[in-house]
Amino acid sequence: MIKRTLYFGNPAYLSLRRGQLVLRLPEVSKNTSLPESFKREAERTIPVEDIGVVVLDHSQITITQGLLEALLENNCAVITCDKNRLPVGLMLPLCGNTTQNERFRHQLAASQPLKKQLWQQTIQQKIANQAAVLESRGAVAKNMRAWAGEVRSGDADNMEARAAAYYWSALFPEVDCFRRDREGSPPNNLLNYGYAIVRAMVARSLVISGLLPTWGIHHHNRYNAYCLADDVMEPYRPYVDRLVCGVVSSGDDYTVLTHELKAKLLSLPVMEVSIQGRRSPMMVAIAQTTASLYKCFCGELRKIVYPEM
């Protein structure tokens, strides 16, 4: 079942009633001139079990502890945004799998050679997907295809960086002197937002698969609580890039992250991707990826399953 992604960008009261998320608007609830029957009809309810990701993007959103508890019990990822309306926090359940202790042990016991092989597979697929994005834009990507095949265990030659240098220089020909930088000029703002959504989906699926998002196979920054999510999301980043390319090519203003642009990026969970020869929503594909990663950790598989563009 595809879980829903909910975005709240205006003042709102969010609470729980009989397993349902209840949405009330302050301008309606506080308006004493409106009849109570109208206020009740203005409420919106959504089953908590249908929700996969919640984005809270306004400082005047009030959410109850009961609703937060219910969302986390249903393995929902809750994203909070800062004053610039960009994702700044991610809340996940502490336990998302009945055999979590056993799965943690397998993950923590993974050998260094295994982790290097998994990283090799991850970078190979990331570069291959980046090449597909460039080709869809009419750019030359034979070199990217070749580099994907040359990635060695652990990406010892840092082919990821070589590919990235070429990729970003060719991805946005419409943008003068584009430079990929988290704090850089647009369309970096769109890329950051899209990556945050994908990261939340990956972290959520890792928890459901009984894995520890903090313990990466390559990323190991001591200040990063989601190293494994940052590893696993790499081959999914090009899907965000392709979506942003479409926005840039449309000629619409993308310098400000409007509600319309956010709505496009929030469609990522239901974007169709090809994984294991089948079309599948990205959220479902990510669940397949994290499930295969666990099987690699416990010795049932030798290859992690990633989407191919």
Image (spheres, rainbow, N blue to C red):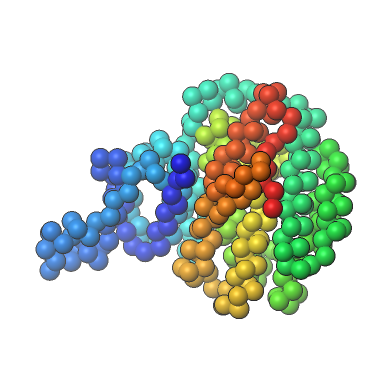
Relative horizontal placement of residue 132, taking residue 197 as reference (left or right)? right
168 or 62, nearer to the observer: 168
Say if 301 sits above or below 250 in the image: above
Q: How many marks?
A: 0
Q: Which residue: 11% across, 63% down?
A: 35
Which x, y percent locates residue 165?
81, 61
Say if 102 sits above or below 118 in the image: above
Which x, y percent locates residue 170?
78, 67
56 or 53, nearer to the observer: 53
Q: Quadrant of residue 135?
A: bottom right
Q: Which residue: 28% across, 55% down?
A: 44
The answer to whether one can see residue 6 in this image is yes
237 or 157, nearer to the observer: 237
Relative horizontal placement of residue 302, taking residue 292 as reference (left or right)? right
Q: Which residue: 61% across, 50% down?
A: 273
Relative horizontal placement of residue 8, taking residue 258 as reference (left or right)? left
Which x, y percent locates residue 264?
52, 63
Q: Quadrant of residue 232?
A: top right
Say if 7 sits above or below 300 in the image: below
Q: Which residue: 86% across, 51% down?
A: 147
304 or 257, nearer to the observer: 304
Which x, y percent locates residue 173?
74, 74
The answer to whether one can see residue 213 in this image is no
